[in-house]
Image (cartoon, helix red, strand yellow):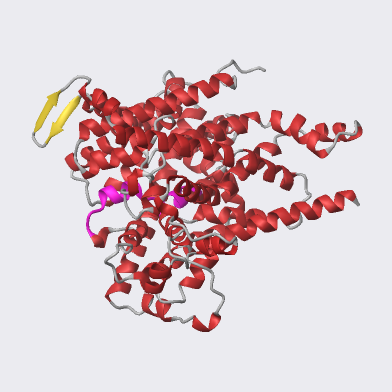
Amino acid sequence: MKIKSFLYSKKVAPYVFVVPFILSLLVFWAYPLFSTIQMSFQSILPGQIEWVGLANYQRLLRDTVFHTAISNSLRYMFWTLVLLIPFPMIFAAMVDSRLVKASGFWKALMYLPALTSVVISGTLFRLLFAEMPTGQMNILMQWLGQAPVAWLKDDTLALMALLSLACWRWTGVNMLYFMAGMKNIDHDLYEAADIDGATGLQKFLRITVPLLKPTTVYVLTISVYAGLAMFLESFMLWGGNNSPMNIGLTIVGYLYRRGIERNEFGYASAVGLVLLVIALIINITQLIINGSFKKEGK
Amino acid sequence: MKKRIISVVCTAVFAVIGFFVIFPVFAGLLASFRPGRELIRRGLNVDLDFSTLSLSNWAYLFSGNADSRRYFTWFGNSLQLTLITVVLTLFICFFVAYGLSMYQFRLRNLLFFLVIATMMVPFEILMLPLYRQMIAMRLINTTAGVVLPGLTGAATIFFFRQYLTGIPKDLLDAGRIDGATEYGIAVRIVMPIAKPAFSAMAILVSLGAWNAMLWPMLIFRESRKFTLTIGLNTLLTPYGNNYDVLIAGSMFAMIPLFIVFLCFQRYFIDGLTAGAIKG
C-alpha cells in the first residue's frame, strides 16, 4: 500500500513517465556511443581485443579509399544543400502566394516520392540510369544527339544520378517544411508591402526569406546530417556496396564495408567517429554563423 | 492581366515538376506489366506500346506459388513490424513527453537536452556497436531486436511535447480535485485531447517503419523473417530469376502507405513537419 501511494504521488509520477526514455537512452544510445569510442582505440578480432591507441586513426589518415569516401560524401552533401534548399523554398513561396492553380493536387503529388522506400525508388532510378541504350536516360541522350553513356561508371554522371534520386525524393518534403514555416509569417507584412508597391520578388527576398530563417536553419541542419550519412541510395544504385573505382562509396558505406563486411569493428568505429566529428563541426559552425545559439528574445 | 500570366507560369512550373515526380513511378508501373527479365536486360523506359502489356507478373505475384507466398510473408512481416513499432513508439513517447511537459522536476531540463542530443548523433554511427550489442543480447533475427532501439524516437517525443505544452495545466488540477490519479489524468483526460498528435505521429512512424531498411537488414538473417524492403533487395541479384515478382511486388509495396496517405493527408503534413515547429 505504501509503495502504491509512493508511486502515485505527484513527486514520483514524472520519473515513472520518463523511465522508458532514461533506460533506452542508457542502453541504446549512451552505451553504444561509449562503446564505439572505446572500440575506435582497439583492434578487435574474434576473441582477441587489443588496445592500439591512435593506430586506427593514423591508418585512416593514409587510407586513400577512406579519403575517396569522405570526398564523395562531402560533395553529395554540398550539392543536396544547393539543390534542396533554394528550390523547395521558391516552390513553397509559389504555392503560398496562391498563384498556383490546383495547388492541393500538386502538393499531394510532390509528397508521393517520400512514401516510396529507398529500395523501390533506388531500383527505379538504377534502371532509368541503366547503361544500355534502351534505358530512359540514354534514350534522352539520343534525343539530344548524344551517344549513350554508362551513367553509373563515371564519377560526375554517377553523382548526377544520385542527386536526381535525392531531388526526386526530398523536394516535396522540404517544400512542406518551408510551407509550414511560411504559415507563421504575419500576412499583414505582405499587405503593407503591397501598399508600398513592392514586387513579388521583393516581397520574397525582403520578407519571406529573412523571416523563414528558423525553418531554413532547421532544414539545413538535418540536410547536413542526411547528406553526410547517405548510404542506402548508393547501395541501391550500384546493387551493393561496391562501385567502379569507389565512385559511389560514402563514409557510411565504408563503415559498413569495414565493420559489417570485414568485421573490423575497431577500424570501422574510427570511421564512424570521424563522420560524427565532421557532421558536428559543419553543423555547429553553421549554427553559430546563423546565430542560433544566441539567447532567445530577439 | 499580369497576375494571370504569372499564375499560368507558376502552374506550368508545377505541372513540369509533377511530370518529373510521376515519371519514375509511371515507368515502373508500366514495366510491371511486362516481363521482368526484359526490364533488367534493357533498363527502365516509358514504352507507350500498350499492346505488349500483360497481366502475367501480377497474376504470378498473386498466384500463391512459392515465390508469391514468400513475397506475402515479407509483406506480412512488414505489416506486423510496422504495427508493433507504431503502437509501442506512440505510447512510450507520449508518456515520456507527458512527463517532460506537465511536471516541474529536477531532471527535466537535463532530460530534454538529452532528447535533443540524441538527434545530434546519426544512427549510422551507433549501428555497429548496437549490432554487437544485439548479438550479445541474443536479439538477432528477432522483431524485438529491430524495434527496441528505436522506441524513444527523439522527433516523436519532441512533437508530443510541443503539442502537450499547449494544453492548460488547470485541466490536470481539475482532474486531481476530482480524485483522478496522475496516471489516470494522463490516460483519461490528456490522451483523448492529444488525438490529433497521435494521428500525425502514427503516420510518420509507420512511414519510417514500413520503409526501414538498414537496421532490419543487419538484424534479420533468414528469408522468412525479412521485411519487404530487405526481401525485395534480395531479388535484385544478377543470378536471380524473380524479376517478375520484383517489379510487380515493388509497385504493390507502395500501396499501403499510399492508402494511408490519401486518407490522412492533413495529418501527414503535420507529422512530416514535426521537427520544424519552432521549439
Q: Residue furthest bottom?
A: B51
Relative depth, front residue between B189 and B227: B227
Dividing the picture into quadrants, the one containing residue A187 is top right
Image point (72%, 48%), residue name: A95
Q: In this view, does A294 lie to the left or right of B62?
A: right
Q: Which residue lies furthest to the top in this view?
A: A295
Whether residue A20 can be seen here? no
Residue B213 painted magenta: yes
Image point (43%, 18%), residue name: B106
Whether residue B215 can be seen here? yes
Relative depth, front residue between A258 and B164: A258
B60, above or below A231, in the image: below
B98, above or below B62, in the image: above
Image point (21%, 35%), residue name: A265
Total marks shown come to 0
Q: Residue furthest left?
A: A47
- x, y (%) of residue A1? 31, 31
User: Looking at the rendering, in which quadrant would you find the C terminus of chain A?
Assistant: top right
Q: What stretch is highlighted in magenta?
A: B204-222
- x, y (%) of residue A105? 67, 58
Q: Is residue A111 left or right of residue B121?
A: right
Q: Main secondary structure of the magenta part?
A: helix
- x, y (%) of residue B99? 45, 30
Image point (25%, 62%), residue name: B224
Q: In this view, does A173 lie to the left or right of A195?
A: left
Relative depth, front residue between A58 and A267: A58
Dividing the picture into quadrants, the one containing residue B64 is bottom left
- x, y (%) of residue B173? 55, 29
Q: Is residue B10 left or right of residue A2?
A: right
Residue B146 painted magenta: no
Dividing the picture into quadrants, the one containing residue B35 is bottom left
